[in-house]
Amino acid sequence: MPGESPSPLPTTGPLVILGAGYAGVTLAQGVWHRTKGSLPVILVDQSPLHVLRTELYEIGKMALVQEDSPWALPLETIFDRTNVRHQLGRVQAIDLVHRKVKLDSADVPFGTLAICLGSQPASYGVPGALVHAHQVYGLEGARRLARAIREVETASVQLQGERRPRFVVIGGGATGAELAADLAMTDWPSVTLRSARAPEILLVPGALPFLLGLPPSVQRRVREMLQCAGVGFLSGINATGVEPRCVLLEDGTRLVADLVVWAAGVEAPELVRALPVPHGRGGRISVSSTLEVPGHRGIFAVGDVAEVLDPVTGLPVPQTAQAAIAEARTAAYNVVALQKGTRPRRFRYQEMASILALGSGRGAASVKGLPLWGRPASWLKKLVQTEYARSIRRGEPSPYL
Ligand SMILES: Cc1cc2nc3c(=O)[nH]c(=O)nc-3n(C[C@H](O)[C@H](O)[C@H](O)COP(=O)(O)OP(=O)(O)OC[C@H]3O[C@@H](n4cnc5c(N)ncnc54)[C@H](O)[C@@H]3O)c2cc1C
């Protein structure tokens, strides 16, 4: 803890990082830069790719482009000039006492551990939400959605009368808004068949305020922009169930849908929720101000998986890539401090911007609390995304995230 005299780590062994998302990759790169290879690093992930999850709302583009390269970078390339070793495997359990991780293929002992396993979609107890609805929280899910839309659109040429395919998006956060915009702004007949019918997009943002946490002017403007793009809002009402081709609302309405997307939020993965450590909202690990798991020296939790309280507001830091990267930089410093027996740093969060892509070169943003609209917001989003991908490929920290 800061303020206490640091003592060296009780055990030796490699730094094992679980999860190669925004937090895990940034942490591995940060430790490599600080130690130049003197600390062995094993980066475990179930995939050989670093998925650019913040871009998975691009369903229209995914329906056109068959390969994964715009949304994922090979881990091998990212770490080819470092000593960071990627171990492919699915984490099954974490043994905090005997300091080892159980993978589907092997057990991996660790000296220091960083849990960066991200998050999974949360159903909030809504029956059928994770069974009958699509989601864009992972690359596979987003790809499945793009394929399903192609099928629905291709079949739409046979629809009777004036009927159009109906896509329902459930979720009133940034993911739901960006996704609804992308679905509404994509020219689906040109992606599938000229005679295909443009879909009707309905957004069910739920009973909480739309885009909670963003300035009211941004909330209003995004709603207007979505409505202009033809997105229908069913506001102030929660979804209570999802059945095949149907969404149930709490007032008893049965909303018929050709396709449903669940974008209502995330929770910690099951194996993380099962750990005997303090948990916060959604089963996230409540970490100390140095991002360590209380009572477990040299075990860190970083990114979506962790609940970090902002020392200024006392509120949890948001679950975003931006926060995951900022946390990972502090965690990298603290991992090395622990090795050297020097004082760790407290995590301080300063949000740079919240930016939403709203299709066809339009966007909305809050940059240090100031609103930004239209093309400038969209350019800013593109700049952040391309610079992140470019810097991560070069093995350097991104200047914007
Ligand atoms: C559509 C969409 C748009 C978004 N837009 C933005 C945005 O504009 N800006 C922003 O800041 N944030 C955005 N976010 C949120 C952001 O993507 C997350 O907050 C961020 O990905 C969290 O990073 P992470 O490293 O904690 O987790 P992740 O990036 O999800 O990485 C977790 C890693 O752990 C691996 N993993 C999980 N379980 C296992 C297991 N059992 N075994 C092995 N490996 C495992 C996964 O394969 C993955 O590589 C968006 C999210 C979505 C879905």
Image (spheres, rainbow, N blue to C red):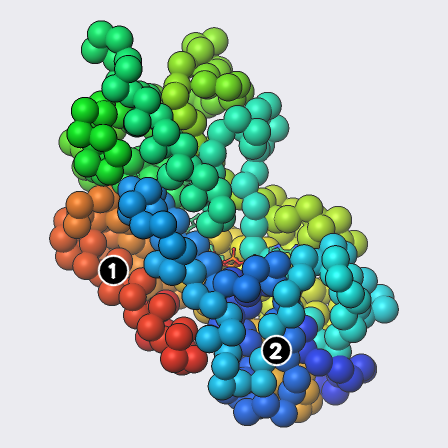
Q: Could you tell which of marks 2 and 1 lies nearer the N-terminus?
A: 2
Point out which mark residue 85 bears: 2
Q: Is the residue at mark 1 in contact range of ligand 1, meaning its CB lies under 8 Å from it?
A: no
Residue closer to the observer: 17 or 96: 17
Residue 223 against residue 346 in the figure, above or below: above
For residue 401, what is the image quadrant? Answer: bottom left
Residue linked to disc 1: 382
Residue 4 against residue 257 in the figure, above or below: below
Residue 29, horizontal then vertical, whole percent? 50, 79
The residue sitting at the right extreme is 98
Residue 192, horizontal then vertical, whole percent? 26, 34
Q: Where the N terminus falls, by quadrant? A: bottom right
Q: Which is more foreground, mark 2 or mark 1?
A: 2
Residue closer to the observer: 178 or 72: 72
Q: CA distance from mark 2 to mark 1?
A: 30 Å
Residue 142 against residue 344 in the figure, above or below: above
Give the class, few, some or many, for how many residues have Cα within 10 Å of label 2's Cα (few <14, many ≥20).
some
- Visible residue check, residue 345: no
Give the class, few, some or many, for how many residues have Cα within 10 Å of label 1's Cα (few <14, many ≥20).
some
For residue 292, what is the image quadrant? Answer: bottom right
Q: Of helix, strand and loop, which one carries label 1?
A: helix
Circle 1: residue type: Lys
- Visible residue check, residue 320: yes
- Residue at x 19% of width, y 59% of height: 379
Lateral position of residue 398 relative to residue 357, left or right: right
Circle 2: residue type: Arg
Lateral position of residue 350 relative to residue 294, left or right: left
